[in-house]
Image (spheres, rainbow, N blue to C red):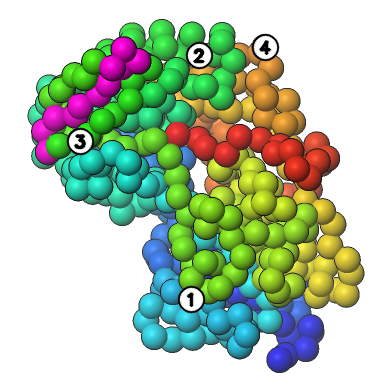
Amino acid sequence: MSTPQSSTVVVVGGGYAGTMAANRIAGHDGAQVILINPRPQFVHRIRLHQWATGTGDAAVDYGTVLGERVRLVVDAVTRIDVAAGRVELESGDALPYDHLVYAVGSTGVAPSTIPGAAEHGYLIGEWEAAQALRSRLEGTLPDAPTTVVGGGLTGIEMSAELGEAGRQVRLVCRGEVATSFGPRARRRARAKLRKLGVELIEEHRVASVAADTITIVGDDGVAQILPSTTTILAAGFGVPGIAAASGLTTDALGRLITDETLTSVDDPRIVGAGDAVAPSGQPFRMSCQAANQLGPHAADTVLARLRGKQPAPVSVAFVGQCMSLGRHGAVVQLTRRDDTPRRTVISGRTGAAVKEMVCRSVAWGLRMEARRPGFMPSVGGQERVVGEPLTSEVRA
């Protein structure tokens, strides 16, 4: 193994958390940083609903967000050989590491409890899924009935984008829409969705999905079969199974279990960041807001070890949740540090401007960290109480 002065740090996953971590670690003179990602472009995931509907781009060249000292390897990691200290790649190659940042992110999933969902539903959580959905929408007429399943932020943003584009769209969710928002924000979201022509069907579960229909059931047990040329699934997230396949300790969903410094409970050389990590078994809400704090913290944990120091415990502070409602509207729900809603809500065109500023600031933060590693400040959040989850975890 190489000395700390020439340590190889492999970052698995080039999303928000992984890119931020790679840029920050690359500022250390003794670190050789390798970022492994299956795609040659950085995916701005919070714009995937725009890409799918043709109202915006969601991919940028890594050269604009990745530091010059970071080596990009376009490949997919299939397994981490923990004992040997190397990652095995889909291409057949293997790369050794002294330290590894596990930042594989999350994926959209088709609920296994809904017959036909995997066969006939379209996902939105990843680049390839968004491309498939975009192709599907381009091949259908605007008045073809479209159903979005899931009343979280992803489902709402997708529905609003489709409604503003003049498509016939309905949003179906098991409970209320935007349950992570307060009542005022929820009312404003409903009003805007209806103004955009989105049919809201709350308090209904999806019983099955077929090629051109969807069956829903209300609380009264009555089933309805509705026409649905395209059914979009935005009802939850999963994570890649690399950690579990590598014999590392994970939670039930497959997230890497770490201690409060984001270090794997199995190996001090492995540090986690982003959606696929559960510190002390208590994950933060899956979001770029958390990823953009977990990425720098994971980097700081690695850097502390390279410098022979003790890493600090994780601390994440939430400030708000925001969702776009088409290109000219949004609802921004300000929150306490623990992600619970405050009374303050910003909506309308002002909300849309805030939402757009947030989206742009994410990419700007990555660029600044690439140019000046360590630029992004550490954010002090609420002290975590082990045994009590700090935040909810599901966005959709």
What's the mark number on residue 343?
A: 4
In this rendering, position of residue 147 left or right of residue 235 = left
In this rendering, position of residue 61 left or right of residue 163 = right
The amino acid marked with disc number 2 is: Arg
What's the mark number on residue 392?
A: none
Q: Quadrant of residue 319?
A: top right
- Location of mark 2 (residue): 186
Q: Nearer the viewer, mark 2 or mark 3?
A: 3
104 in relation to 213, above or below:
below
Instruction: Write the start and end of the magenta stretch as one range.
Output: 211-221
- Location of mark 3 (residue): 209
Badges 4 and 1: C-beta atoms under 8 Å apart? no
Q: CA distance from mark 2 to mark 1?
A: 42 Å
Check disc 1 and report its element: helix, strand or loop: strand
Badges 4 and 2: C-beta atoms under 8 Å apart? no
Q: Residue furthest right?
A: 309
The amino acid marked with disc number 3 is: Val
Which corner quadrant holds the N terminus? bottom right
Which residue lies at the image location 20% right of the left edge and 27% below the top edge? Answer: 215
Which residue lies at the image location 85% right of the left edge and 74% below the top edge? Answer: 307
Check disc 4 and report its element: helix, strand or loop: strand
In this rendering, position of residue 135 left or right of residue 11 = left
In this view, the residue in front, 21 or 255, is 255
In this rendering, position of residue 252 left or right of residue 139 = right
Q: Could you tell which of marks 4 and 3 lies nearer the N-terminus? A: 3
- Location of mark 1 (residue): 79
Look at the image and say whether residue 249 sits in the magenta stretch.
no
Q: Nearer the viewer, mark 2 or mark 1?
A: 1
Q: Position of residue 164 (x, y in %)?
A: 29, 20
Q: CA distance from mark 3 to mark 1?
A: 34 Å
Which residue lies at the image location 51% right of the left edge and 30% below the top edge? Answer: 356
Q: Could you tell which of marks 4 and 2 lies nearer the N-terminus? A: 2
